[in-house]
Image (tube, helix red, strand yellow):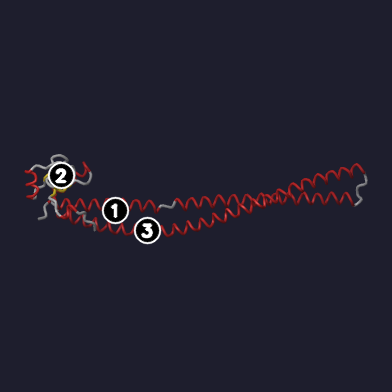
Amino acid sequence: MTTSAHLLFELQQLEQDIAEKEEKLRQVQKALRGSRKLAKAQRDFEEAEVAYVQARQRQRELEDELSQVEAKIRQEEERLYNGSVRNPKELSAIQEEVNHLKERQNHLSNEVLQALEAAERAKQVRDEAATALRAAEADWQKRRAKLQKAEEKLTRYLAVMQKKVSQLRATINAADIERYEYLKARKGLPVVAPLQDEVCGLCGVAVSQQKIIAVQRGDLVQCGNCDRILVRATRNTSQHKRA
Ligand SMILES: [Zn+2]
């Protein structure tokens, strides 16, 4: 015999299942908003790219400066040896300037080498970051496809379950639904508890013989301790039905 309590119990199972699947759907939708791993790979790549561009820029600046110093050396040496300057004092001043420029040239040559090496290292870091980014993008594509499938499946499932709930609600009398909703608003699910060996299946407190008889008769009876609606235990009340 299907009693009112059994119908409410069935409604509760459907609603609990819906709540669980809605929570899963929320998690899937949250995950679909983006991948932290991918965002980090993007940031790493952007940083490495900036560092590489800066290193190349530094290298070029030093190379330009070195070229200018070398041009100046050629120019001064020309004046030194082409006979245009004859004054010994002036000649020795030019020689001093050339010596000074050659020191600068030496120093800059070292700096250019170091800058070149730094730029090569920066390029390697940038290339590795680009590879990691491509891998993270490929991973995310796969993960997103899975998540989208899960989202579609859950959405379809929920639509079916909502329909089942509406159909079931239509078969339950209004006063019973009202009592169920009232308890649900006060306590949250579950509000229907199976009777287990003359004890409330939810709070574990013994139920009076009078109430047990009323439950077996099919009346809507509430546990004297926790107020839950008591339902006669059947195979369906002890096993959770999962669609
Ligand atoms: Zn109880």
Q: Residue furthest top?
A: 225
Residue at 82% across, 52% down: 74
Mark 1 or mark 2, earlier in chain: 1
Residue 202 appears at what percent x and percent y?
Answer: 18, 44
Q: Residue furthest front?
A: 197
Q: Between tags 1 and 2, which lies in front?
A: 2
Q: Between tags 3 and 2, which lies in front?
A: 2
Tell me whether the residue at label 1 lies in contact with that at label 2, contact meaning CB atoms closer than 8 angstroms. Answer: no
Mark 3 or mark 2, earlier in chain: 3
Residue at 15% across, 53% down: 7
Residue at the spot of label 3:
148
For the C terminus, which image quadrant?
Answer: bottom left
Q: CA distance from mark 3 to mark 1?
A: 15 Å
Residue 60 appears at what percent x and percent y?
Answer: 68, 52
Q: Are there few (<14), some (14-19), or many (20+) residues within 10 Å of tag 3? A: some
Residue 132 appears at what percent x and percent y?
Answer: 51, 56
Ligand 1 is within 8 Å of the C-beta of the residue at disc 1:
no
Residue at the spot of label 2:
200
- Image-based side of 45 in relation to 238, left or right: right
Query: What amino acid is labelled 1 in the image?
Result: Lys
Place residue 130 in its image quadrant: bottom right
Residue 220 appears at what percent x and percent y?
Answer: 11, 47
Residue at the spot of label 1:
21
Q: CA distance from mark 1 to mark 2?
A: 27 Å
Query: What amino acid is labelled 3 in the image?
Result: Gln
Image vertical order of residue 160 relative to residue 95, above or below: below
- Image-based side of 239 in relation to 33, left or right: left
Secondary structure of residue under mark 2: strand
Mark 3 or mark 1, earlier in chain: 1
Displayed-image quarter of ligand 1:
top left
